[in-house]
Amino acid sequence: MYIYNAKIFPMDCPVIENGFVRAENGIIREVSAGNPKEITAGDFNAESGLLFPGFIDPHSHIGLIGDGMGAEGEDVNEDSDPITPHLRTIDGLNFTDNCFADAVKCGVTTAVTGVGSSNPIGGDFIAVKTHGRCADEMLIRRVGIKFALGENPKSSFSDKDSAPVTRMATAALIREALFKAGRYMHDKLDAEENGDSLPEYDIKSEALIPLLKREIKAHFHCHRADDIMTAVRIAKEFNLDYVLVHCTEGHIIADILGEEEASALIGPVICDRGKPELAELTTANAGILYKNGVHIAICTDHPEIPVQYLAASAAYCVKAGLPYEEALRALTVNPAKIIGIYDRVGSLTVGKDADMVVFDGNPLEIMTSVKATFIGGKACYRKEN
């Protein structure tokens, strides 16, 4: 299958003013200038549209908070226990949720989704395609464990007979779980090497072992500057590969985060200051962090901001100072690298998944429409003329 007559933005090499992409068996096989030698009825004429890799929303709760379903459709916070790293998002993901179709129609082909932020340690985060017959088919891979600092855990557990009710207790519970998991991991290794009996199975510690091995990342929900620095502090203590989620007051300590070579998922961008932690919310945040050397991507935190407004969120960041080219990277290359899925998505590169979107104009302009969205080389959406 060819997508031809397109202005191609590969995102990992210069723009091709007029060219084509060939996909076969769900994989990109060729990206070239000019036109294909032979065109068939199954190919797609982009009609001078702009061809991008499918956009990526690197932090959301899509499929876990049902569209218009209320409490019955909410499977995002297991707040019966503050420490739940063993929860698997795939077991709660409603792959028939209408919002996946909304994502496809606006060119978002990959979403990172997972448990909410009520718990100091919530559960895993997974990267999924936004179209498929079931969650198992949509899954790219497990990418992280969710941690939460600040206001959310405090407010969630303040009316329960359980810690945490302070920031200190939140951090202490996280440290306790990580230390316990580290000891459990070493006890297992010692037992295996010496032929001894394995320690009693601990499902929570088991879930944290890939994190301690740096096979997946720690996703820290943090808005306030002090909570952001607590995330950095804990990550250093346990040698975690980490991501700062929201990072709302990152602009206050941008130079420090730049020195740390931190990665941040900025968003929601176009929302109100609906709780105390959002008092310093500004659309200039992404640009300030970028200029200080922080690796940034833009997220919606769907359904806080619906997934279809991902590109609009990036546009507001550009208006407030983020360079235009970097905003495009913050929707494609950057989130793929930060999340750890760049081997599959994020650029139009031979060998990667054929996830592509054709726009009829600048994707950051409000009146621009998606002409077609392809996932795995298959047209999942085409705009009706």
Image: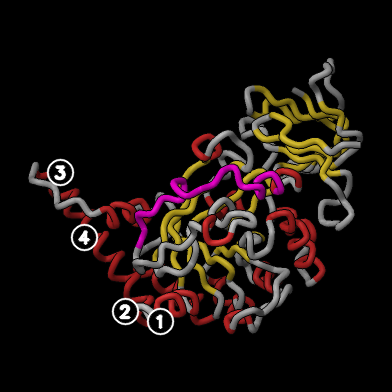
Counting residues from the N terminus, which is met first, the one under dot 3 or under dot 4? 4
Q: Is residue 144 magenta?
A: no
Q: CA distance from mark 2 to mark 1?
A: 8 Å
Q: Horizontal and vertical percent for residue 42?
A: 79, 20
Q: CA distance from mark 3 to mark 4?
A: 14 Å
Q: CA distance from mark 2 to mark 4?
A: 28 Å
Q: Horizontal and vertical percent for residue 168?
A: 37, 82
**Which quarter of the image is occupied by the N terminus?**
top right
Residue that numbered label 3 is attached to: 192
Q: Mark 4–mark 1 contact, CB under 8 Å?
A: no
Q: CA distance from mark 3 to mark 1?
A: 42 Å
Q: Mark 3–mark 2 contact, CB under 8 Å?
A: no
**Which quarter of the image is occupied by the C terminus?**
top right
Write down the quadrant of residue 101 in the picture.
top right
The residue at the point 37 percent across, 63 percent down is 239
Which mark, by number, is residue 161? Answer: 2
Tell me which amino acid carries mark 4. Answer: Arg
